[in-house]
Amino acid sequence: MDTLSNMLIMIKNASLAHRDSVVFPHSKLKLAIVECLAAEGYVGAITKKMKHGRPFVEVALKYNADKSPKVLEIKRISKPSCRIYYGARDIFPVKNGHGTLVLSTPKGVMSGNKARKELCGGEALFKIW
């Protein structure tokens, strides 16, 4: 099972169902991705919690002024069966700048705009809009 895809689908489904927050098991990669999404304005506060002796991450979801969710769609690019890598010149805007590409680079998990500015490529994880 792909735990990263599960996390992304949980965020998407919870925001479309107008939930306040979503909880999923903790890992360093998941936490880095959620921090990147928070920096881009897709999710709100991030808290680490312990539940039955295991760490979990709780993420508050954000909504627009008209109560529509900030996260409408998430499209996974690189999968465990087929990894996709982009160079710094290959990074493209998503939905004419209305979306974000999230990459795993040697400098950490970052958005496509930040990776382009730092001239750093890496594995394209997913697109979000």
Image (cartoon, rainbow, N blue to C red):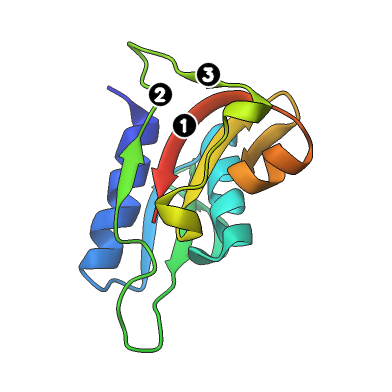
In terms of sequence position, does the residue under pointer 2 or pointer 3 come before the other?
2
Q: Which residue is drawn at 48% across and 63% down?
A: 42
Q: For this view, does 40 lie left or right of residue 107? A: left
What's the distance in space between the residues labelled 2 and 3, CA to CA?
A: 8 Å
User: Relative to 61, does residue 64 appear above or below in the rendering?
Assistant: below
Look at the numbered discs 2 and 3 and tell me whether their residues touch, using CB distance below 8 Å: yes
**What amino acid type is highlighted by mark number 1?**
Leu
Amino acid type of disc 3?
Tyr
Task: Name the element at disc 3.
Answer: strand
Residue under numbered circle 2 = 78
Label 3 sits on residue: 85
- Residue at the disc numbered 1: 125
Q: Which residue is drawn at 42% across and 37% down?
A: 126
What secondary structure is marked by label 2? loop
Q: Which of marks 2 and 3 is in front?
A: 3
Check contact, mark 2 vs mark 1: CB within 8 A: yes
Quadrant of the drawing holding the N terminus? top left
Q: How crowded is mark 3: few (under 14 residues within 10 Å), some or many (20 or more)?
A: some
Q: Earlier in the sequence, mark 3 or mark 1?
A: 3
Q: The disc labelled 2 sits on which kind of residue?
A: Ser
- Which of labels 3 and 1 is toward the front? 3
Q: Between 35 and 95, which is closer to the camera in this rendering?
A: 95
Cα distance between the residues tagged 2 and 1: 5 Å
Question: In the image, is residue 124 above or below residue 55?
Answer: above
Which residue: 27% across, 61% down? 14
| Residue at disc 1, secondary structure | strand
C-alpha separation, residue under disc 3 versus residue under disc 1: 9 Å
Task: Establish if 31 lies above or below 16.
Answer: above
Q: Can residue 27 be seen in this view?
A: no
Which numbered marker is on residue 114?
A: none
The residue lying toward the viewer, choosing from 117 and 81, is 117
